[in-house]
Image: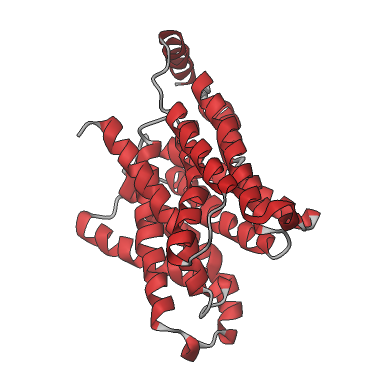
Amino acid sequence: MDNKNTTMLALIFTVLFWGFSFIAIKIVLTSFSPIVYMFLRFTLASGFLLVILLFTGIPKLDRATHFKLFLTGLFEPGLYYYFETTGLTLTSASKASIILATVPILVSILARIFLGEKITRNSAYAILLSCAGICLLVLGESGLTGFNSSMAGDLLILAAALSAALYMVCARSLGNQLSSLVLTSFQLFYGTLMFLPVFLYKVSAQSWHAVTLESFLALVFLALFCSVGGYFLFNYALTQIAVSRAAIFLNGVPVITTIAAALILGEQLTFLQITGGLIVLVAVFIANLPVSRMQKQNLATATISHH
């Protein structure tokens, strides 16, 4: 299997894992508080990766690389999950979904500034089309009644989107010098540390006797598949294709979540949701169409001038 097919499979499984994660999170939060859940999720994921590194060998990294890895973990999972979780308590899930759909736009801007990546015409069309698809997906679920929110909540969700974009740019930069395993491991190591102080403050309020087997298994799924598997696969994809192209795939996450909710939770799909989902899938297809010879020359020139 060539690199292109491997990259596409990595992105597809990332979207599947992260799409199903929202169902698992609903189950987990019936037994755990948000902060306790996040700390346990990433601690379990970090422990799993540490065991793998003990067998494969822990690399010696310089301070500059450790600092970049710290920033990667700080942006995501650290700040991203903090801003998203806090923002959702102040704004509607519908509006949050639309704001988070702007991540590919933010990624394209930041990748242009910090990595010298030029966005292709296909990617530009795909970003706009995927945002439109997300809007239809959200409207199909809640209509115009699901947009009650506060400005503070909207700004926190926007901060989460910016954090996600900064993580992708950092990971793309590090992907040239580190393996996906090392990058993912240290990203989650440092990210877990972000949750430790708040976890120590909140842990005394956790009702451990109320934890169910179902929520525990959901926690394990989130740690091993969504954190370890998802970030490993996405970080691998970031080493293979432009970060703006990889980011467009993430707008497929709400589509998978909507389908999963219909299959697992019995939620009804509306015509607008189906239409929005199909538009997002078309956008992902457009983003991966072959670029023209002129676009390839422009991208090659940008890469050479950047390095």
Query: Which residue is at a point 34% across and 37% down the rendered structure image?
Result: 8
Image location (x, y in percent) of residue 63 = 44, 47
Q: Residue furthest bottom?
A: 209
Along the horizontal axis of the image, is 45 left or right of 130?
left
Image location (x, y in percent) of residue 178 = 34, 41
Along the horizontal axis of the image, is 156 left or right of 260?
right
- Looking at the rendering, in which quadrant would you find the C terminus? top left
Query: Which residue is at a point 47% across and 58% down the rendered structure image?
Result: 190
Along the horizontal axis of the image, is 56 left or right of 92?
left
Residue 56 figure quarter: bottom left
Q: Residue furthest front?
A: 271
Image location (x, y in percent) of residue 13 = 35, 48
Residue 173 figure quarter: top left
Residue 79 figure quarter: bottom right
- Looking at the rendering, in which quadrant would you find the N terminus? top left
Residue 16 against residue 30 in the figure, above or below: above
Out of 18 and 274, give the one closest to the viewer. Answer: 274
Query: Which residue is at a point 62% across and 63% down the rendered structure image?
Result: 85
